[in-house]
Amino acid sequence: MKKALGMIIRSLDSETELMGFIENAEKFGHKLDCVIVAYTCQHDPKVERRISEKVPFYAVNINNPLYCKEQLLKRGVSDAAMKVLLECPVDTKSGLVPYGFNRMIVVMEAILRGMDTLFFIDSDVYPRVLKKNGDKLELEDIDFFGAHLQHLNSGAQVTTGEYSGYNILPHASFDGMGDLLAGVQKSNMLEYWEKSETHRCLVIQEENPEAKPCKKVLGGNMAIQLSAFSQLPPFFSSHYYMDDVLYLCRGEDTMLGLEIAKGGRTCTDIGLNPLHDTYKNYPVEPNLREDKSVQDRFYYACTGWVGRNPLFNYLLGSDLEATREYQRECLQRGLASLAKYTGNPRFSTVLKNFDVSWNSLNRYIDEFKQVSEAWSEFNDKV
């Protein structure tokens, strides 16, 4: 089994946590056949050399994925399909690239290089878990690759897991929490968020976790048998502009999870929760009321969720008109409460993002169909 480690990142200007995962594989006796990183803005050859000393390394420029282009031409993929699969749909000068497009470049690179299994990590995820030792919290090294491989070798086509560390929902307490979560389609998190006074939204690795079938896939903690992609749709997410500012829709992993479940394929939550440094300063507790960087991170999470939801509900087969109306009413109330709670009026503007995104649904659907058709041609040819 040939194994690749993949990551998407804006600038390859440091080793980030990539080297940590490479050394984690070495420590636990796993051979990585290559590392594939899709980057957007910068590329430091010194970083590439250091990583290449450990494992074959391929840095893929999103703006010009040369190897993919050469290989698709050789295999007779049409110009139209190549354009959809390989040409970024937005100007990348800002460093922003739709997550689905970004991930699929890594997937195609891995397939074209003859890999069997692809492990995906994010640049803010670490091969350690946060555990409780008596009254103390400690970070403990984990056999990240071994944990995924155990279940892949037992028949799972996709393996994934949650994260330890601070949740994307920061500790908060205000009257409109339920409305806000309903507005961004995360009502299943309400009970958890309402209890954040107790747990502070800090997720700790369970002792002796049990693996279980799942429908939710997290792109920063997953592995996939690449052969499964012959019957799966691609990662997909779109984008939208509001007041000439580019926003990325979240949920490319959520969309894939939905399609995995529809297709009856095997996805396993392995119960292993590597540390996610969600707010870039662990172990500092995120302070939503007073820390502008936390507010900004949460703001972009909200704009990404409202970006995801129109297409997500289309794929779910929801009543789109009723869903839009209900979510907008809830969001309007929830955002007003959040803006008051934080003293940050910027949150109120997310309602405009919501409207722009829903008005973009027909474009999202067209893009999804185009990418799916191009991906089908890729599978036929490759």
Image: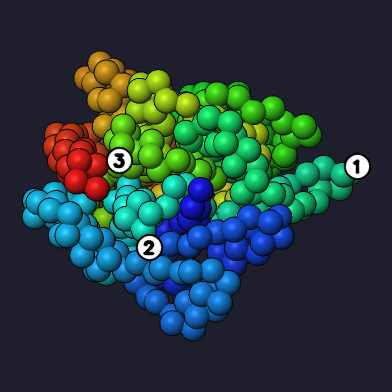
**Picture disc at residue 356:** none
Dot 1 crowding, Cα within 10 Å, few <14, some 14–19, many 20+? few
Where is mark 3, residue-wise? 234
> Distance from label 2 to label 1 (Cα)?
41 Å
In the picture shown, does residue 228 fall above or below 286? above
Q: Is residue 35 visible to the viewer in this orientation of the structure?
A: yes
Where is mark 2, residue-wise? 38
Q: Mark 3 or 1 closer to N-term?
A: 1
Furthest-front residue in view?
A: 1
Q: Mark 2 or 1 closer to N-term?
A: 2
Front residue of 331 and 132: 132
**Picture disc at residue 134:** 1
Dot 2 crowding, Cα within 10 Å, few <14, some 14–19, many 20+? many
> Distance from label 2 to label 3 (Cα)?
16 Å
In the picture shown, does residue 270 fall above or below 291? above
Question: Which element is circle 1 on?
Answer: loop
Q: Amino acid at mark 2?
A: Ala
Q: Is residue 109 left or right of residue 84?
A: right
Question: Which element is circle 3 on?
Answer: loop
Cβ atoms under marks 2 and 3 closer than 8 Å: no
